[in-house]
Image (cartoon, rainbow, N blue to C red):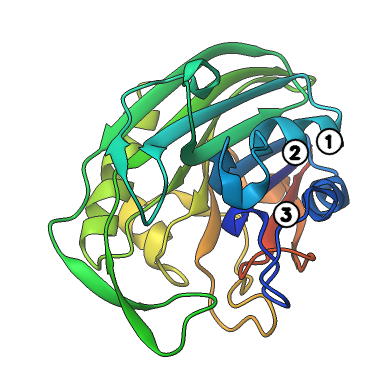
Amino acid sequence: MRLATFNLLHGRSVADGQVRQLDLVGAAADLDADVVGLQEVDRGQDRSGGADQTAVAAAALGAAHWRFVPTLEGVPGGAWTASGVDDGSTVIGPAYGIGLVSRWPVRSWHVRRFGPAPVAMPLLVPGSKGLTRVDDEPRVAVGAVLDTPSGRLTVVTTHLSFVPGWNVAQLRAIAGWARTLPGPRVLLGDFNLPGAVPRLATRWTQAVRIATYPSWRPRVQFDHVLLDGVSLTAVAGGRSIRTAISDHCALVVDLQAT
């Protein structure tokens, strides 16, 4: 079984700043993963051609099961409201959030929401010069209980706050919430936390230590795959994949039956 997590940057190329749906299709197909967590995902946004990017990725992977869960309804960086919708396909108008895609049947979907951190942070924003003051956004975790060829598995994906400390608290809350769902469990996503911090914060098993950011010269690992109830001996390998889109590399982990 292949798992992947990928911050899409809404399909934007860091080379020329353009968003082309064919680039997203190619990037998703290159992962060839059975289950993929997606972050910074657009649905119905002008900047990305109005596409439902989770659906596009699912089609490229030949995956029949997927869910887009919005954090925002409206335009990121413009006028928006926090979303409370668990199934983004029902949203009328533009939305932005995360997605989970699976080739395996989904028994049930689960969502956990978080409010934004109350402080802004100076960040390096693709396309901008120097540091830009950025307000935090609402965050969400989406979990799916899957029927895989190896048995039942719960996979949770999320995109955590960039505010130090706030993201650790969110991660711990999600790990605790995930343990209320059937095991074994995988928690993957862009945690905005480096290296071994997610493992130390949750006491879950870290599948691989591989730098994923920035995509053109990865030096730090912000994107992670954590395991609970899955032995490290089940990890057959892992790698980062640079694609035509995003300032993050995708992180791919292969699991084998033990």
Location of the N terminus by quadrant is top right
Sequence order check: which comes first, mark 3 or mark 2? Answer: 2
Single out the residue that lies furthest toward the bottom.
130
Q: Which element is circle 1 on?
A: helix
Which residue occupies the foreground of this view, 55 or 256? 55
Per the rendering, the mark at residue 57 is: 2
Residue type (three-letter) at the residue carrying disc 1: Leu
Q: How far apart are marks 1 and 3 (CA)?
A: 14 Å
Query: Which residue type does callout 3 highlight?
Result: Val
Rendered residue at 30%/50% (across/down): 137
Residue 123: % across, % down: 36, 77
The disc label shown at residue 252, or none: 3
Residue ID at (26%, 65%): 163
The residue under the point 21% across, 42% down is: 115
Residue 38: image location, x then y, percent? 60, 44
Q: How many labels does the image show?
A: 3
Please give the residue where the numbered disc 1 appears in the rendered image.
Answer: 61
Amino acid beneath label 2? Ala
Which badge, 1 or 3, comes first in the chain's sequence? 1
On screen, residue 98 above or below 77: above
**In the rendered structure, are the residues bearing label 1 and label 2 in contact, judged by CB atoms less than 8 Å apart?**
yes
Instruction: Give x and y (percent) for residue 246.
Output: 65, 65
Q: Are marks 1 and 3 in contact (CB under 8 Å)?
A: no
Mark 1 or mark 2: which is in front?
2
Crowdedness of circle 3 by 10 Å Cα count: few (<14), some, many (20+)?
A: many
